[in-house]
Structures are given as C-alpha cells and as structure tokens.
Image (cartoon, helix red, strand yellow):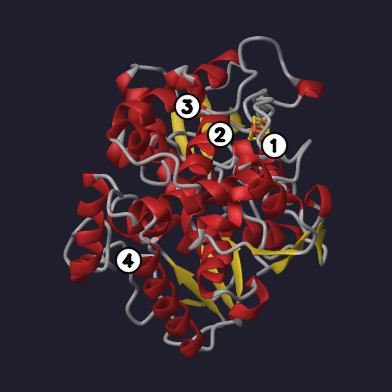
C-alpha cells in the first residue's frame, strides 16, 4: 500500500484536472488534509473573540469532526479509495453542509487544497453510486422536470411578478434572469430590480421562456440534469444576443458565472455574455451618475455577504495539468481564494444612501457565516437551516443593528423565517428594496 501511494502521489507528472465528475481528481486534496481546522476558524488577525470565531455552520451545529471539512475529506478519501461504503450517516454528513465555501477559503490560507470542489465531487459520486440525493431534493428535481421551476408552480405564473409600470423590452442589451424564487416567492425583489433598471434608464428583456437555473440539481450532485439545463439556458441567452445577463439572486449569479462554465467545461469569458448581479450594475450606475439615491433611509443596518455572491463568485477557468513532487502543479493553477468576490459594491451602495449607518458584523466578506439556506440544506435539513440563521442573527444583535440587508432571496427568506421563529425585533431586507426606497421620484 505504501508503495502504491508513493507512486500515486509523489511520482512526478501525474495527470489531473478539476472535473468534479471524477472524484479521483480530488484524492490528492482529500488525502492531504492535515486536520489543522484552519477551515473552521476565522482569520486570527481579526478574530473578534470567542463568540464569533468559527466559520463552518455544519461543524458548529453538529459538534462532531465528521461534519467539518476535515471529516468530509476523510470520508471522501476513503470512499474514493474503495475503503468505505455509503451508509445513512455518511450520506447525512455529506448533505448537511451548505457548500458555503468558508472551509475552502480557510484552507487555502495555508494549503492549496481544493476543498469546495472535493465536496461537490463527493455529492456527484453519491448520485452516481445511487444513494444520493436526499428525498427532499428528488422532489425538487421532479418539480423542475415537470414545470421548469423548483416549486412545481404553474409555468404560466412565472411572469406574474410583472405589475403595472414594469415593461420588459422585446430586445435589449441587458437580459434580466429573474430566477424561480424572485419569480414565484419574492416578487418584491424582482419588482425592485426592474424599478432600479428603469430609474437608471436601462431597457431590459427577459428570456423568451425562463427556466430554473438548476442550482439545486447541481448542488446535490445531479450533474447530468444540471449540465443539460446549463446548456439549454446558455444557448437560449446566446440566441437573444444579450450582452449582459443580470441576476438578483446570489445563487443564480454563481450558477451562471461559475457553475455553468464548470459544467460546460468552458471559461466564464467563453459564455459570450457578461454575468452581473444587480448590485454590480447599480453600483456602476450610481458612480456614473445615472442612478440617484436621494431619499433618506434613516436606518442603522448591517450587510450579510451571501456566499454565492462573495467567496464563491470568482470566475471559472477549466484546468488540466500535471502534479509533481510535493504536489506542485504545472501549468500554474490560478486558485480561487474567495478574496475577489463582490464585496465593495453593495457596501458602497449602502453607504451612498442618505441616512444609512452601515455597521459591519465581526465575520464579513470571505469570512462571513453562511445563512444556512443554500445548496439543498433548507429543503433536506430545515432545522439546521433555521439554526444557522439564528446563529448569524446573534451576530447582528451583537452589533446592535435593527436592519439586516442581503442580496439574495434565499438569505432573505431564511433570515425572515428565523426572525419570526425567534420573535426578534429586526427588519430583514433585500438590498434592491433598500435602493428602491432611496431612488428619487
Ligand atoms: S480542510 Fe484544510 S484547513 Fe481544514 S483541516 Fe484539512 S487541511 Fe486543515
Ligand atoms: S462548505 Fe461550509 S458548511 Fe460545508 S464543511 Fe465547508 S464550511 Fe462547513
């Protein structure tokens, strides 16, 4: 066994890539986890004390090493080597994780290990091995197959959010991809986004027939279904000739910008159109004077970095190369460390609103603590999702803010439900609503 490992990991010039279809691509990363728990602790340089010093919702909630990235790396490694079979507990451990990327960012401070990709690949393996995903995820997959939206709602209601005064154009350079949640649940976010575009003098079109982005399919490891949806959606947008695809959902943003290219084995640039979240667009419009926010919004607020708009949003570049002595790779692999996410734009917007007092939480930017809703957790583990949101709300209370702002309907809904459950005196808003409240006229 030792000889085999020696050949496998140390022989110079071993081929490898970043394709999550094949867990063998990540055996090196999983085997090199040293259980240091750098993926659990927030940066020491600004660790605010003992109260908010961890970054992994799964490890914090379940208080058992298997649930941290270090545990999942051990499980994944053993399974990839054929030393461990699936059982109900292993499946729970693999899916009771928001794939929030906090561990990936934490690990890459010291080691260039691809933790997020290993976790995604492990879920793909679970599905390919016939044990995943969880029953709640299968229901969503069925909804998407039948109705092209994750809620199983009637297709014809997808544009019901369009009220008087909102007039999408037949043809425009900007295409607004609304997403299932803003279309069917959080109409206020879609309406606010349309109002911001109108106020900035920007025409926008919609997809001729918008379908789900496939976030849940991809996140739970249903890679064939997610790839088919990615190809369909990218083809449809290319046909429209749009130059910019705009989202108001962080999860949708990550899908279009990072995971569609990942699934289609192309770079983000090769999509043929740019992908922007509306905060990037609004920030640019405010700075060039096209969008004016003049109405005061007298509120002390804090901003929650949604994982998929922040540390998980760096562009994708396909990679195939060779790994040599001590894990060195060639050609150079540009690591995605989460530091180039969308951090300044939402903060600049909020600070530009008269009357807003923006206060930061201890854990912010790439160290932010996930709201707990994403990547199939809310559906399969609702108690965990609620616990994570309540844990984050404790941080909001700690800094004494009355309003929590995010840039994703998933975050807004999970926080809103947690506020209600805890009977907290707190307002939860999407940033599009805050911008709208300050737009003149
Ligand atoms: S995943 Fe990375 S940071 Fe976490 S324990 Fe392993 S080596 Fe350390
Ligand atoms: S992705 Fe998030 S929840 Fe999952 S192990 Fe990493 S830090 Fe924990």
From mark 3 to mark 2, how far is it between C-alphas?
8 Å
User: Which mark's residue is nearer the viewer, 2 or 4?
Assistant: 2
> Under 8 Å from ligand 1: the CB of mark 2?
yes
Callout 3: SS? helix
Q: Is residue 209 left or right of residue 237?
A: left
Q: Are marks 1 and 2 in contact (CB under 8 Å)?
A: yes
From mark 4 to mark 3, how far is it between C-alphas?
46 Å
Residue receiving disc 3: 66
Q: Is residue 169 left or right of residue 77?
A: left
Callout 2: SS? helix
From mark 1 to mark 2, how far is it between C-alphas?
9 Å
> Under 8 Å from ligand 1: the CB of mark 1?
yes
Residue receiving disc 4: 162
Q: Quadrant of the N terminus?
A: top right
Q: Earlier in the sequence, mark 4 or mark 1?
A: 1
From mark 3 to mark 1, how far is it between C-alphas?
16 Å
Which of the 4 image quarters holds residue 18? Answer: bottom right
Residue sitting at x 83%, y 52%:
325
Q: Is residue 152 left or right of residue 60?
A: left
User: Which mark's residue is nearer the viewer, 4 or 3?
Assistant: 3
Q: Earlier in the sequence, mark 4 or mark 3?
A: 3
Callout 4: SS? loop
User: Which mark's residue is nearer the viewer, 4 or 1?
Assistant: 1
Q: Nearer the viewer, residue 110 or 258?
A: 110
Which of the 4 image quarters holds residue 218? Answer: bottom left
Residue receiving disc 1: 107
Residue receiving disc 2: 69
User: Which mark's residue is nearer the viewer, 3 or 1?
Assistant: 3
């Amino acid at each position: 066994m030792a000889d085999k490992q020696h050949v496998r990991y140390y022989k110079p010039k071993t081929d490898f890539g970043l394709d999550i279809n094949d867990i063998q691509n990540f055996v090196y990363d999983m085997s090199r986890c040293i259980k240091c728990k750098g993926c659990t602790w927030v940066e020491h340089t600004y660790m605010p004390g003992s109260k908010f010093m961890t970054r992994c919702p799964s490890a914090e909630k379940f208080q058992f090493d298997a649930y941290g990235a270090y545990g999942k790396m051990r499980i994944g490694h053993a399974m990839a080597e054929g030393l461990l079979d699936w059982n109900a507990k292993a499946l729970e451990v693999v899916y009771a994780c928001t794939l929030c990327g906090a561990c990936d960012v934490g690990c890459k401070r010291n080691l260039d290990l691809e933790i997020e990709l290993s976790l995604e690949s492990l879920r793909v393996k679970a599905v390919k091995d016939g044990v995943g995903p969880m029953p709640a995820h299968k229901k969503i997959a069925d909804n998407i197959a039948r109705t092209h939206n994750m809620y199983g709602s009637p297709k014809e209601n997808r544009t019901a959010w369009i009220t008087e005064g909102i007039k999408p154009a037949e043809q425009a350079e900007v295409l607004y991809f609304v997403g299932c949640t803003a279309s069917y649940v959080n109409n206020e976010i879609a309406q606010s986004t349309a109002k911001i575009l109108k106020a900035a003098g920007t025409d926008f079109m919609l997809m001729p027939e918008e379908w789900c982005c496939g976030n849940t399919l991809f996140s739970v490891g249903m890679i064939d279904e997610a790839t088919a949806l990615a190809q369909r959606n990218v083809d449809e947008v290319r046909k429209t000739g749009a130059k910019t695809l705009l989202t108001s959902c962080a999860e949708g943003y990550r899908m279009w910008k990072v995971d569609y290219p990942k699934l289609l084995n192309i770079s983000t640039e090769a999509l043929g159109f740019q992908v922007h979240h509306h905060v990037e667009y609004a920030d640019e419009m405010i700075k060039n004077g096209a969008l004016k926010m003049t109405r005061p919004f007298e509120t002390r607020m804090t901003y929650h970095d949604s994982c998929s708009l922040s540390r998980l949003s760096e562009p994708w570049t396909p990679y195939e190369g060779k790994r040599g002595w001590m894990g060195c790779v060639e050609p150079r692999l540009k690591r995605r460390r989460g530091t180039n996410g969308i951090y300044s734009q939402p903060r600049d917007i909020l600070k530009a609103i008269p009357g807003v007092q923006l206060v930061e939480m201890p854990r912010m930017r790439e160290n932010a603590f996930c709201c707990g809703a994403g990547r199939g957790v809310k559906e399969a583990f609702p108690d965990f999702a609620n616990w994570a949101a309540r844990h984050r709300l404790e941080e909001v209370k700690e800094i004494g803010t009355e309003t929590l702002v995010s840039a994703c309907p998933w975050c807004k809904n999970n926080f809103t439900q947690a506020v209600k459950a805890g009977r907290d005196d707190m307002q939860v808003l999407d940033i599009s609503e805050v911008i709208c409240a300050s737009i003149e006229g």
